[in-house]
Image (cartoon, helix red, strand yellow):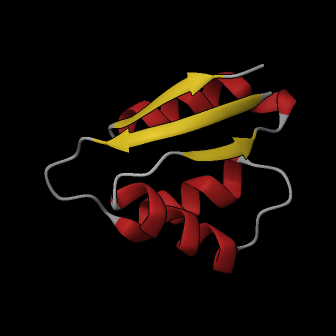
Amino acid sequence: MKINLLSCDAQRPDRRAIAKCIVEISTGIDSGLANELTDILLEGDPVDIELDDKNTGSALRALRKLDIDYEIVE
């Protein structure tokens, strides 16, 4: 499943927690790339990631917990 991470509405976003979440829920993203994607997201630009299909529900819950807005692409 592909999703777009649109924005992070947290008052004080936790960069490490967001990057760790991206590594855990996505396929083919390492910690270095996750840090770059986190910076892009926090600057206000959307980020596309591919989710691991077996844990989609828990991945979406983790994103909501971090106050990350997303949209499902496929």
Residue 8 in the figure: left or right of residue 56: left
Residue 21 in the figure: left or right of residue 69: right
Horizontal and vertical percent for residue 66?
A: 36, 43
- Is 50 above or below relative to 56? below
Q: Residue at x 78, y 19 (%)?
A: 74
Q: Could you tell me if residue 32 is visible in this image? A: yes
Residue 51 in the figure: left or right of residue 7: right
Place residue 4 in its image quadrant.
Answer: top right
Horizontal and vertical percent for residue 34?
A: 62, 67
Q: Residue at x 68, y 60 (%)?
A: 23
Q: Residue at x 83, y 51 (%)?
A: 27
Horizontal and vertical percent for residue 72?
A: 64, 21
Q: Could you tell me if residue 66 is visible in this image? A: no
- Is 35 above or below relative to 67? below
* Of 22 and 37, the residue lying toward us: 37
Horizontal and vertical percent for residue 1?
A: 80, 27
* Furthest-bottom residue in this view: 32
- Is 50 above or below relative to 16? above
Place residue 15 in its image quadrant.
Answer: bottom left
- Is 28 above or below relative to 30? above
